[in-house]
Amino acid sequence: MIHLNIFYAAAGNIARHNLKSMIVVLCLSAILVPFISALSISEGTKKQSMISVEQGADIYLTMDMYGRNGMIPAALSGEIEKIDGVTEAVPRVIGRIYVEGRLAVLLGLPEKRFASAAGFIDGPPPVRDGIVIGKGLAESLGLRTGSDLSIGVRIFAILEHVPYIQKKVYTVSGIFDAESSIWTSSLILMDIEEAIAMFEMEGFVSDIAVYVQPGHTQQVVESIQKMNSFFRVQTKGTAMTYMERGFNTKNGVFASLYTLAFAVAIPLVLMLSGFGLSERRKEVGILKATGWHTHEVLEMVFYENLVLSLIAASFSYVLSFIWVRLLNGAFISRIFIPGIESMSSFPVPAEFSGMQLFLSFFVSLVLTMSGSIYPAWRTAVIPPAEAVR
Amino acid sequence: MNNSEDRAQSPEHRTQSTEHRIKTEEHITQSHALIRCDGIWKIYNEGKPNEVRALSEVSLSVERGKFVAIHGPSGSGKTTFISIIGSLERPSRGTITIDGKNIAGFSDAALSSLRRRRIGFVFQDYNLIPGLCAWENVSVPLIPEGIAKKQRKERAAGLLKTFGLDGRAEHPPEEMSGGERQRVAIARALVNGPDILILDEPTSNIDKESVSGLTDILNSLKAEGRTIIVSTHQETLSGNADVVYELTKGRITGHKDYNGPNL
């Protein structure tokens, strides 16, 4: 009952100091809204990327070139397919292209692969000079089946030391849709021969996607590595690990920046929460003078912070939801999705969860407690006669 | 040894204070003191250039159930002294015992418990919490007692009614007169049932009519057996006291016991 009484007193204090409470909540929200928004976008992007990898091939094969992934001879796909346990080896061409002044990703696949991907294609597989584009990209560029689209590729002629942009006009032969908004807004599918010609990589492809029978991945990897020590083999598992690590690094950088912001915010909350002000000091002095113990005063301050943090976290969660869902994560989404505009033209992927709400509540509580518990304790332990003076 | 100690133990001071202490101690030993102050010093900023000596070797005793007035002009150290008696402040030196226990050495928690159980304090400017209505202000000391809101309200309303404020229970202090605020503050001081009530300059912010009402309240509280200590610079309240101590420049300079020997 004592704790309940003190809790009600704390809730009453929040209502009584309504303006001050509102300012504290707004200050906390100013810190928490970008935090929750960024976390949700990061989670959404990560989830979509993971799905892409999950649904992709079991092994990706490239050549080691200067310690990085290099082009691989297209003809190798036939030999890879002969390895025991391999069900299919698909040569792919992947590259960045420019359409209407913006970046997109071009994926060149053999015609037979389009058939397996046809489930999401509206229209026939691309023919020579034809492309299939994502629904989001088509909507943002105002394209439909039959429209023409000019595609530019940056080429660097090594021997001549001359960079240039090669452009060609293609006809939209189909539009595809997918779960991932990132892909539908930036991906263009093309026949592999046409893609090889576009990137001037005659006889080579970007990688070979290898599909294997369940449980054969390790065995196939070993067989591939025996074929040529210059092969770079990446399994689905390692791809996921790298991707996760990349997202975690970004989140880590973001969290570090936020730690800095918190360090700045603590004195602000300290100032606004009123424990540095004579009014609150006097109030604590009155409580002590009427027989309250120091730990009871601190308990009340803790409850005040608890309630304020709950309000701030819930309010921030709602605002973040509005920012990400209604305002499509304007300005903040580009931190986690490279190459997009401040106002993204496609629905920014985002995942809201209870964990974010809990995290923001926890952060608020740490922030308000750091800003108020020590000043409250200092006020509570000075003689009441001095505190009320 | 610092300046204050030098001065404190100068021959002239020592003679005066020793004589005074002997007289006071004679009186104390003759009585059954509830509160006993012995050689209380209060020095602010001790040893610094802005050192202020508020109390110098003050000794007195208060018997149970008595009405004691600490009388003296402004700046004589009355508020400091009764704050020390009320355990709201610690003395720089000296001992203060309540029922034989030296509270000068009490911990912060023990002092809080003492204030909660034994002492009700009414500040000169009342120190009511703004925004809380009268009954809420009165019931503040009951919150950490674990008493439910309904009971707190009943007990506070009962006290307010006793002091003629039954129609004002829901009003905040901002909507009350000085006299009404004072009665709310007295009700708050009494809500935990303390046996010692201390009032700092209770007549300074109220009109003559309210002073008369206050005198009646204090007399009735005394009749209940409570020990009352009042600091005042006016004769109005001192006239009702059993014992009056004169405090001048931080020293007890006189003592009148209307029920016993005068020193």
Image (tube, coloured by chain):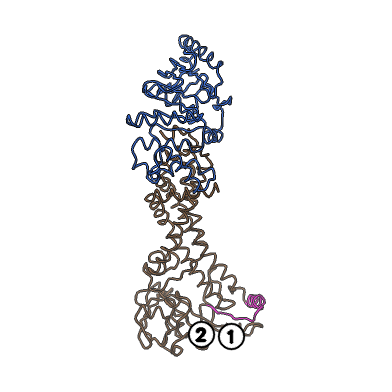
Chain colours: A brown, B blue
Viewer-nearest residue: A369 or A257: A369
Residue B3 point in image, percent of width and height: 46, 17
* Residue B5 relative to residue A160: left or right: right
Which residue position holds label 1?
Answer: A78
* Residue A47 relative to residue B69: left or right: right
Residue A265 point in image, percent of width and height: 42, 50
Which region of the structure is painted magenta? A207-227
Is residue B193 on the magenta stretch?
no
Q: How many marks?
A: 2
Instruction: Check contact, mark 1 vs mark 2: CB within 8 A.
Output: no
Q: Do we see residue B236 in this rendering? A: yes
Which residue position holds label 2?
Answer: A117
Residue B94 point in image, percent of width and height: 52, 21
From what the image shows, is residue B27 above or below residue B154?
above
Is residue A223 on the magenta stretch?
yes
From what the image shows, is residue A198 above or below residue A41?
below
For label 1, count other residues whose C-alpha is less than 10 Å away and answer few (under 14), some (14-19) or many (20+): few
Residue A110 point in image, percent of width and height: 51, 86
Q: Name the element at disc 1.
A: helix
The disc numbered 1 marks a residue on which chain?
A
Q: Label 1 is placed on what type of residue?
A: Gly
Q: Do we see residue A233 in this rendering? A: no
Q: Report, in whole angstroms, how far the alpha carbon at label 1 lies from the one at label 2.
A: 21 Å
The disc numbered 2 marks a residue on which chain?
A
From what the image shows, is residue A217 above or below residue B143?
below
Viewer-nearest residue: A307 or B205: B205
Q: Name the element at disc 2.
A: loop
Badge 1 or badge 2: first in the primary sequence = 1
* Residue A201 relative to residue A212: left or right: left
Q: Label 2 is placed on what type of residue?
A: Ala
